[in-house]
Amino acid sequence: MIEGQCLCGSVSYIYHAELEKTILCYCQHCQRAQGTMCGWNSPVDKNKFEIVRGIKYLKEYFHSPNKARVFCQECGSPIYSYRVDLPDIVRLRLGTVTQGHIPAPVEQAFIQYRPVFMKVEG
Ligand SMILES: [Zn+2]
Ligand SMILES: [Zn+2]
């Protein structure tokens, strides 16, 4: 089981399963949206993902029509994203995890935007 929350604590969630894989995404949308060099995400089953507190604080931003980036509008923490054409999958933002095991990343996307000082295996 995985638990997590946004920075201010208005939003918290439970994932009623384990994380199977994690991904580093260096695309420029993730860089802008997260304010950092990459997104660290895990695709999870939406049917096992539960917002336990603060659903009213969640805001969806569509930078492209098919993809929503969902964040806490109190503190700005990115919580997850989802694709409109893949409604059963949520891409959890792993910096918000407070409890549970996070596996090491098995995939890196858009490494052409990865800063040269980052040396990561794989
Ligand atoms: Zn918050
Ligand atoms: Zn990305």
Image: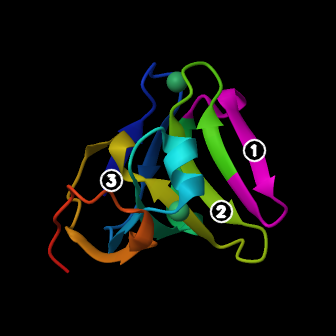
Q: Please report the residue visible at 30 percent of the width from the left and 58 percent of the height from the top.
A: 1
Question: Local crowd at mark 2 within 10 Å, few (<14), some, or many (≥20)?
Answer: many
Q: Quadrant of the C terminus?
A: bottom left
State the separation of the CA atoms marked 3 and 1: 24 Å
Q: CA distance from mark 2 to mark 3?
A: 18 Å
Give the x, y percent position of residue 73: 65, 25
Q: Which residues are magenta?
A: 53-68
Tell whether 48 sits left or right of 63.
left
State which quadrant residue 115 falls in: bottom left
Give, as a three-letter code, the residue at label 1.
Tyr
Read off the residue under disc 3.
2
Label drawn at residue 61 = 1
- The residue located at (23%, 52%) in the rendering is 100
| Secondary structure under the numbered disc 3 in the rendered image | strand
Return the mark for residue 26.
none
Q: Nearer the viewer, mark 3 or mark 1?
A: 1
- Check residue 82 in the rendering and tell me which mark sits there, or answer none: 2
Q: Quadrant of residue 22?
A: bottom left
